[in-house]
Amino acid sequence: MPLSNLNNEQHASATAILGHNLTIASAGTGKTSTIVGRIGHLLHSGIKPDQILLLTFTNKAAAEMIMRVAKFFDETTAKAIVSGTFHSVSYKLLKKSDKPITLKQPSELKTLFKSVYEKRVFVNQTDVKPYDGGYLYDMYSLYLNSSYDETFETWMGKINEDQKQYTLIYEDVIAEFNKLKKQYGYVNFDDLLTNMLELQKENTYDFVEILVDEYQDTNPLQGKLLDGFKPKSLFCVGDYDQSIYAFNGSDINIISSFHTRYDGSTIFTLDKNYRSTAPILDLANKVIQNNPRIYEKSLKVVRPEREHVPQLLKFDELYIQYEYIAKNIVKSKNKTEDMAIIYRNNSSADGIEANLRDAGIECKRKGGHSFFDSREIKVILDLIVLMVNSNDMMAFIHLIEYGKNIGKAIAKDIFEALLRVGHGNLFHGLLNPDNSIIKPYQSRKVTNVQLGLFDDFIEMGSVSKFKDLGWDVKFLNNNILKHPKLTLEGGIFLYDFYTIVKELKRIQNPKNMIIHIQKHKFFETIIETLCTHRAKQKDGTINESIKSSAKLKSHRRVETLKQLSSRHTNLQNFINAMILGGGEMSEGGGVNLLSVHASKGLEFKEVYVVDLMDGRFPNRTLMSKGGSLEEERRLFYVAVTRAKDILYLSYASYDRIKKLDFVFSPFLQEAGLIKDS
DNA sequence: ATTAATCCAGTTTTT
DNA sequence: CTGGATTAAT
């Protein structure tokens, strides 16, 4: 029984009557057990699992809770609960309603946005510079996530009055971008939520209860989504002291105004901390007391042992700090998996990782960005994307650009030509071209100073260079080969593309597809170019040993991807899972290297919070751009409350690489570790 | 105009 | 180590 393990407070919360319930759960007070208990209670009272919606901050957290439910009930029941992040749940529901969705990597659509933006000409009447494309993209995303019922213009006016004059142009760019997205069926993270909001107007959902974990990090857009489901009951769990996503629009007022927004709502409080020892909690509380208290909290310590007092480590230089920590970790009796190094900024991670490696300590970094950002993985994913959505222009261009003498422009020409000879379908154009279309490269709009805009007719090139290569006649006769700038090498690359597409069409399973890609000439050619490039030295020569180790590395990456794919049977689901949950993946084992944000919800026996210098933690640059000291303090609170038994806080007064002097973080003073001088 | 090569700066946090 | 900008070459 999931309820029998709960203490009185947890039990009261978990068995609350349906309605609007908020549980304030401080760090380490058994929030997850309470949610699992709540789900158990709902199921016991006869509510069907598919009438329960569980929203968490990461998909991993959702999966873990579902696993725990499965222990008490059967797996089928547990898995019938609709669960995941706001984004992944929206994705599932949108897909169910047959909305065309191709989820793209965030950076991809940003690039598309920038390309739309660059075509605009700004007439500057004032000396206020307009935002650049990338920044505007981020701002618009923040607007979508953080605004209530304002227009972009009024919102912009509040953020930066000077920028208001450009909003008409900005909105026009955004409109064109949205049109383009619609045309290709592309969707970004924000679209998942906004499209879901639209779908809620068409469909009705009969969720009896929605459970929301990490409620303090809900933003207004997500708030609208919650209300849009019109659930009979809402069960929210959170802690305002752990709200750390303001940069993403999360609004602490959402949790603090819960009782006024929902009439007759009930607020529960969990205040018994089972995680950390008394000295660690004392320190955390001492610091967070400096923030305004929203709901009264009095954390009760369950573990009174005092043998490990949080220790302050001071160093003269950044790397001496990392070195010392590495040595300390070697000496520790704890297993490496039970230890974590937590930092405010990801820029700390490289130095730490290098020092751990030197000391022979295994470590894993969360946020597999480097993994999914690697070219070889992108190539494979783009190929799979193309097999799912054959007309995906961005995926096509990325792949074809690897061909010699084929850049963006020619790749786009080829894409459009293929659509022409395929009557709107890229694969038809490739595999069964309409050869009666003699000139697939009809025109390209060209601006000429004298003539203005005119159609530049592309002269058809010769295809004789492709004869006698043993190609399929079908491909040899394809008129797309007549592009005048297509070289022999480029053509051969295209032929490899043709054969791989033809072969992959027969494969439906992600893992088999990766296996096939891996040994195909098309992929091998790309890996060869990639690794040669990586092994190129300053003088232009190729270092063979670097090259072979690069090849080994990329082979390992492909193997990792293959591993990840084995859990999936559907191509599209696999792709989207990689985009939605990719950041949660971590490779290998060992000491955990985490940003404070990534550490949310986790706990470790031994924790090092490092680089506690004023400017870096709190991050002053961010504070000047709309952050706040309160938010930085909450970050500090989150970081230290990850520790169960042992906590180290460290700082260094000098960075010899950047030649910067540092002063310790004010939080150390607030914690009483440094006396006022 | 387009591609390839070269050099330079920069690096907040996440779905 | 990579993306962006600049430059050289076609």
Image: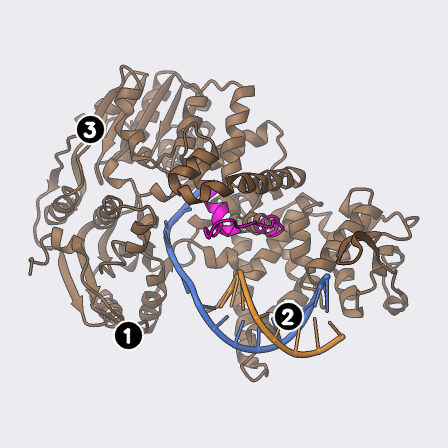
Chain colours: A brown, B blue, C orange
For badge 3, the amino acid type reads: Thr
| Sequence order check, earlier mark of 1 and 2 | 2
Q: Indicate the chain on which mark 1 is placed.
A: A
Residues indicated by labels 1 and 2 sit on the same polypeptide chain? yes
Query: On the rendered image, what quadrant is the N terminus of chain A found in?
Result: top left
Residue with the mark numbered 1 = A656
Can residue A547 be seen here? The reply is: yes
Residue in the picture at 52% in, 43% down: A577
Q: Nearer the viewer, residue A160 or A428?
A: A160
Measured from the top left, where is residue A494 in percent x and y?
A: 76, 60
**Chain part drawn in magenta:** A114-141
**Up-down relation of residue A594 to residue A26 (above or below):** below
- What residue is shown with label 3? A269
Q: Amino acid at mark 2?
A: Thr
| Residue for badge 2 | A529
Q: Quadrant of the C terminus of chain A?
A: bottom left
